[in-house]
Image (cartoon, rainbow, N blue to C red):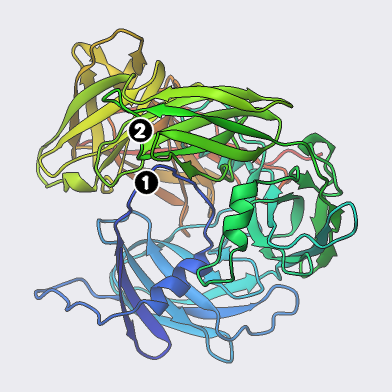
Amino acid sequence: MAQAALQDGENESRITFAFAVSVGAIMLSVPVSYAAVLILLIQNSAPAPAKPSGKVPAPCTVSGRVVTAAEGAPLKSSRVALMLEHESREPQVYAAVSDSDGGFTIKDVPAGRYHFIATHTGYVDQEYQSNGGETGAILALQAGQDVNDVIFRLTLAAVITGRVSDEDGEPMGLVKIVALSRPSEEETEDRDNFSARQPELRPATMAQTDDRGQYRLFGLKPGEYYIQAADEYEPPQMDFGHDWEIRRSLGSQFAPAYYPGVTQIGQAEAVTVTPGEEAQADFIMRHIRTVQVAGHVIGADGKPATDAFLYLEELPAADFGTFEGIETDAKGDFKIKGVAPGSYLLHAQQHTSEEPSYHASQKIEVGSDNIDSIVLALGRGVSFAGRVEATGAGRVPFDRLFISMSSHDDETGGAWARVKKDGTFEMLDVPDGSFAFSINGLEEGWYIKAVRLGGADILTKGLEVEKGESGGTIEVVLSKGGAQLEGSVKQDDKPMVGVRVRITPDPETPYNRLRSRSTSTDQGGHFSFIGIAPGHYRAIAKTTGPAGANRSASAPQIINVSEHEHKTIELTVAPPQTQ
């Protein structure tokens, strides 16, 4: 569900939007470009809400130009947007489209701290004063301020095209192609999962081959990419015949391949692209012997589970997808065809709109023979009741909160639950293991003050689940009394713009690392964090830049913050060392 409001005037747009996310059995994460977000907002426009009455601070105006990085030529129809650094329940975006001279003006912008981005089709998205790095600077606006000297220099995006065929040279149509790249240092630090596994590759973009076996991956940043082809057909929204049903019934007969035609990522060759380059990467997918994985699912009531949904997750867990899912039949049986040799987690969950639902997971090793004797029993894990309460001023819409338990072991399934309007929740079928607790859907400024199961502190030591336990009640306390930490970053007594500042719990453990936060300094070298949970933290500032660039950092500073405290610090970055 998405709501958006758009108001145009002299090349400017004001967009207010709110998203309510429905979480299903499978949760996948794929990168979404700023351009895609802006297009979605503009296409789903509606009349803007009326402004509240009363005296308000004078608005700001931001203007500038968008040009090409290579020639400095104006870029017409570029989309430029300001997005609040500290979002509220209904985030606001202030946007404009550049004119024939590349110029833009965004008026009536409230004072505040903003992420500032420019996008254009065929070019790499750029953040304000990014200087070639992954992240840019925050734009801080004071009441009535007029910023009129912004220049975005966009770099041409690269393209990778190619053809995928089988051993006989026949084109492979409707094959999923994924461009994978190694995560940057910032992305690795900011990973928000509990797993100890460090992702080696992440998806940059994806496409499908056409009837000629050809594909086109566009909008790529200059750099190195590994290209994967997988016979995982995603049906289109319109009807193109019975191909999808037939392919799903047969299962894949081809092993996933990496350019230049190998089955292991360790043997793959990277495709390097420069700005504006169109590289060619053709390769072959080869037939392999696949097997069938079959079995039976038993419901929590001991009867065949006729409403179960199953899917395979490859191990080590892939960051960019899962195996095609299937449903149990009227007898609670299932068959997954076309499974290649390897290690997997088999997941089963009740296929129902009711929440919460039961689920189960089991690790399986697939070789050259069919597996037909798997039995998954729903409701055999430990179940917990729970209640969420909020302290202090403010109101929390509990039914927007989603609670998850993440396992430190990649071979153990997790658990999740949606909170009801009255603050209660049920966490069903939690498997054996060690879990970290997290909540999605909290507004900026709120933090998790405490999570306890009896006398156990889950925030500090996690949730340990063993067979034979009787469960219990998980008590969750939220607070809007978080601390505020702000400060400045300098080098040789000069403010540093666009420097990355990160705070991590001290000491950092697998259970509290979700309290880590990152931001960038603004045009004056200042940074700001709000809603920080009380405790000890380690603060450090690092310069950013292209991969392989010589970066420098400040000495770590250990700080302690209490509820409602407003603390200011200064970080000093050492000058870069000469080679």
Binning the other alpha carbons within 10 Å of mark 1 as few (below 14), some (14 to 19) or many (20 upward) gives few
Q: Where the C terminus falls, by quadrant?
A: top right
Which residue: 50% across, 57% down? Answer: 137
Is 493 placed above or below 472 here? below
Amino acid at circle 2: Ala
The x and y percentages for residue 358 are 32, 31
Disc 2 to disc 1, C-alpha distance: 18 Å
Is 158 placed above or below 248 here? below
Amino acid at circle 1: Gly
Relative side of 315 to 86, left or right: right
The x and y percentages for residue 356 are 25, 36
Q: Quadrant of residue 8?
A: bottom left
Q: How many marks?
A: 2
| Residue 24 disc label | 1
Between 374 and 543, the residue placed more toward the observer is 374
Relative side of 178 to 33, left or right: right
**Can residue 133 be seen in the rendering of this structure?**
no
Binning the other alpha carbons within 10 Å of mark 2 as few (below 14), some (14 to 19) or many (20 upward) gives many
Report if the CB atoms under discs 2 and 1 are less than 8 Å apart.
Answer: no
Relative side of 35 to 113, left or right: right
**Residue position for label 2:** 305
Between 536 and 389, the residue placed more toward the observer is 389
Between 66 and 456, the residue placed more toward the observer is 456
Q: Secondary structure at mark 1?
A: loop
**Between marks 2 and 1 in the image, the one whose residue lies nearer the viewer:** 2
| Residue 496 disc label | none
